[in-house]
Image (cartoon, helix red, strand yellow):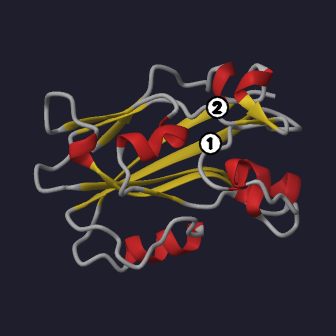
Amino acid sequence: MNIQTDFSTIPDQYAKQAPEELKIDGTPILSFPFTVSGVSENALYLHWMFVDPDSIPVCGFQWNHWAAANVPIAALQSGSAASVSIPEDFSRKVELIAPEAMQGKNSEASALLGHKNPKITTGYVGPTPPDADHEYHLIVWATTEPLKKLSQGFWFNELEREIRDAQEAPERAEVFLVGRV
């Protein structure tokens, strides 16, 4: 399984330099598109997380930007069953595209930050590195079964636990992307 994007550096509209109409409270909210290819024909669901481990020296923890689970592959396919495209702005359009999919809380939901607006505490929030360019990791898993113990607004550790405990070993792919200051 492989992940493809049309970029290796995250374009401005998905990150810190996004125009104000694509931000809420200064936080970028337009999620970027990507494609997952080489998906097993048995896989029915995708799950992913988008994280910034370079934030650890800055704020003391890995910044979690986006988590999604139980995204039905059938809702995203356009042609080949082995290739699945996640469209731009999927995070805000998920209820229209794949109503059974779930999104998790991101680091904006941390008690340390005090944000309460679900439009920025759940789903995608774009990179806004404060100190230097950061390397981001997008990790995608494919499974034959949904992750049944998750509910809307799950935490990242719950997703990781469910992936680890999946009945079959999930397929996994990872890509590294750069976010600019």
Number of numbered tags placed on the structure image? 2
- Name the quadrant of the C terminus: top right
Of residues 76 and 168, the one drawn nearer to the viewer in this rendering: 76
Q: Measured along the vertical axis of the image, is residue 23 above or below residue 46?
A: above
Label 1 belongs to which residue? 136
Badge 2 crowding class, 10 Å Cα cut-off, few under 14, some 14 to 19, many 20 or more, is some
Of residues 47 and 97, the one drawn nearer to the viewer in this rendering: 97
Q: Residue at x 61, y 45 (%)?
A: 124
In the rendered structure, find residue 178 and report the number of the disc placed on it: 2
Q: Measured along the vertical axis of the image, is residue 162 above or below residue 46?
A: below
Could you tell me residue 148's position as x and y percent? 35, 76
Of residues 76 and 166, the one drawn nearer to the viewer in this rendering: 76
Could you tell me residue 13's position as x and y percent? 66, 21
Q: CA distance from mark 2 to mark 1?
A: 6 Å
Q: Measured along the vertical axis of the image, is residue 141 above or below residue 168?
A: above
Lateral position of residue 29 relative to residue 89, left or right: right
- Tell me the kind of residue under disc 2: Val
Could you tell me residue 81's position as x and y percent? 14, 38
Q: Residue at x 26, y 42 (%)?
A: 75
Could you tell me residue 26's position as x and y percent? 84, 35
- Tell me the kind of residue under disc 1: Tyr
Q: Residue at x 13, y 31 (%)?
A: 80
Lateral position of residue 66 relative to residue 82, left or right: right
**Labels 2 and 1: the sequence-earlier one:** 1
Q: Residue at x 17, y 39 (%)?
A: 82
Is label 2 in contact with label 1 (beta carbons under 8 Å)? yes
Badge 1 crowding class, 10 Å Cα cut-off, few under 14, some 14 to 19, many 20 or more, is many
In the rendered structure, find residue 151 and report the number of the disc placed on it: none
Element type where label 2 sits in the image: strand
Element type where label 1 sits in the image: strand
Lateral position of residue 44 relative to residue 166, left or right: left
